[in-house]
Amino acid sequence: AQVLAESGGGSVQAGRSLRLTCAGSGYRLRNTFMGWFRQAPGKEREAVAAIEIGGGKMYTADSVRGRFTIFQDHGRNSVYLQMNGLKPEDTAMYYCAAGLKRAGSSWQTNEYDYWGQGTQVTVEP
């Protein structure tokens, strides 16, 4: 079974940085999207970034491009989200997710089969 565990959230002031970690186990190392999603109270879940495990291609949402970077550590079976220049609107619960790549799906529309419990990120003005 695939297990995902997020860590690294916290409360910071605007302009600061955080790095989220998603430690995974039990998932296939090919043809898989590993992604980060976020959801703020009263808002829909938003796809933030993803990486193709095996291929290495990375994707980020327009709302965070240039500030957030996703990368992986093959040796540790982990995926990270480096968040720089944080803004109050980045405040949300951040979730790590994994799913086999489905034909015809983008990283945002792909079905993600496994989810972590989430880690809270709060950005103070």
Image (cartoon, rainbow, N blue to C red):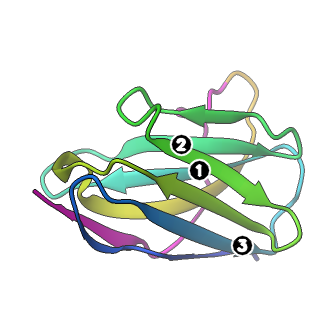
| Residue pictured at 26% horizontal, 59% vertical | 92
The x, y position of residue 47, in whole percent, is 44, 41
Q: Give the amino acid type for the residue marked by disc 2 in the picture.
A: Ala
Number of other residues with Cα within 10 Å of mark 2, as a class: few under 14, some 14 to 19, many 20 or more:
many
Q: Which residues are magenta?
A: 105-125
Could you say which quadrant of the image residue 80 lies in? bottom right
Number of other residues with Cα within 10 Å of mark 3, as a class: few under 14, some 14 to 19, many 20 or more:
many
- Between 13 and 62, the one nearer to me in the picture: 13
Q: Main secondary structure of the magenta part?
A: loop
Q: CA–CA distance between discs 1 and 2?
A: 6 Å
Q: CA–CA distance between discs 2 and 3?
A: 16 Å
| Residue pictured at 30% horizontal, 51% vertical | 86
Instruction: Reply above or below: 29 against 58.
Output: below
| Residue pictured at 42% horizontal, 50% vertical | 84
Q: Is residue 87 left or right of residue 116?
A: left
Q: Earlier in the sequence, mark 2 or mark 3?
A: 3
Q: Secondary structure at mark 1?
A: strand
Residue 111 visible to an observer of this rendering: no
Instruction: Reply above or below: 52 against 3.
Output: above
**Residue position for label 3:** 24
**Residue position for label 2:** 49
